Image: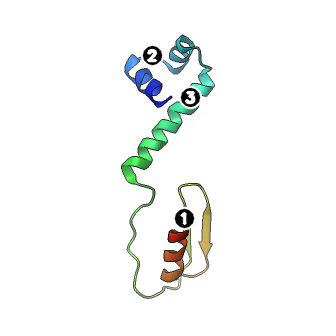
Amino acid sequence: MFALVEQYRSSGQSVKTFSQSQGIKASTFSYWVQKKRKAEETQATGNFIPINLPSTGGSGGVEMIFPNGIQVRLSHFDKRQIEQLIKIY
């Protein structure tokens, strides 16, 4: 389907016109256009963004949001706990 999205991009047509010409529902094709865009963004930036962790814990909380949408909130900064959560993912 991603190859079809590439064809659409180079066609200059609207999603509705292109999808109709391919016999695909516009809503279905729009889903795949968005999915390809997100895949390209993930590929360009990687699944995680780099962060610099201090060697000692801080007093503030931490929130981690994984690429699959899972959110983890820690009440305090703990470098070892964060490292373990990243390895689990």
Q: Name which of mark 1 and mark 2 comes first in the sequence.
A: 2
Task: Tell me the distance, in whole angstroms, between the alpha carbons under discs 1 and 2.
Answer: 40 Å
Task: Tell me the distance, in whole angstroms, between the alpha carbons under discs 3 and 2.
Answer: 13 Å
Foreground disc of the pair 1, 2: 1
Q: Which residue is mark 3?
A: 30
Where is residue 67 drawn, in percent x and y? 53, 55
Q: Residue 42 vs residue 89: left or right? A: left
Image quadrant where one finds the C terminus:
bottom right
Q: Which residue is mark 1?
A: 89
Where is residue 70 drawn, in percent x and y? 61, 60
SS at circle 2:
loop
Q: Are marks 1 and 2 in contact (CB under 8 Å)?
A: no
Task: Tell me the distance, in whole angstroms, between the alpha carbons under discs 1 and 3.
Answer: 29 Å
Q: Outermost residue toward the top?
A: 21
User: Residue flagged by tag 1: what amino acid is it?
Assistant: Tyr
Q: Name which of mark 1 and mark 3 comes first in the sequence.
A: 3
Q: Are marks 1 and 3 in contact (CB under 8 Å)?
A: no
Q: Residue at horizontal 50%, vertical 16%? A: 18
- The picture quadrant where one finds residue 24 is top right
SS at circle 3:
helix
Q: Which residue is mark 2?
A: 13
User: Residue flagged by tag 2: what amino acid is it?
Assistant: Gln
Query: Where 44 sits versus 50, above or below?
Result: above
Q: Nearer the viewer, residue 85 or 49?
A: 85
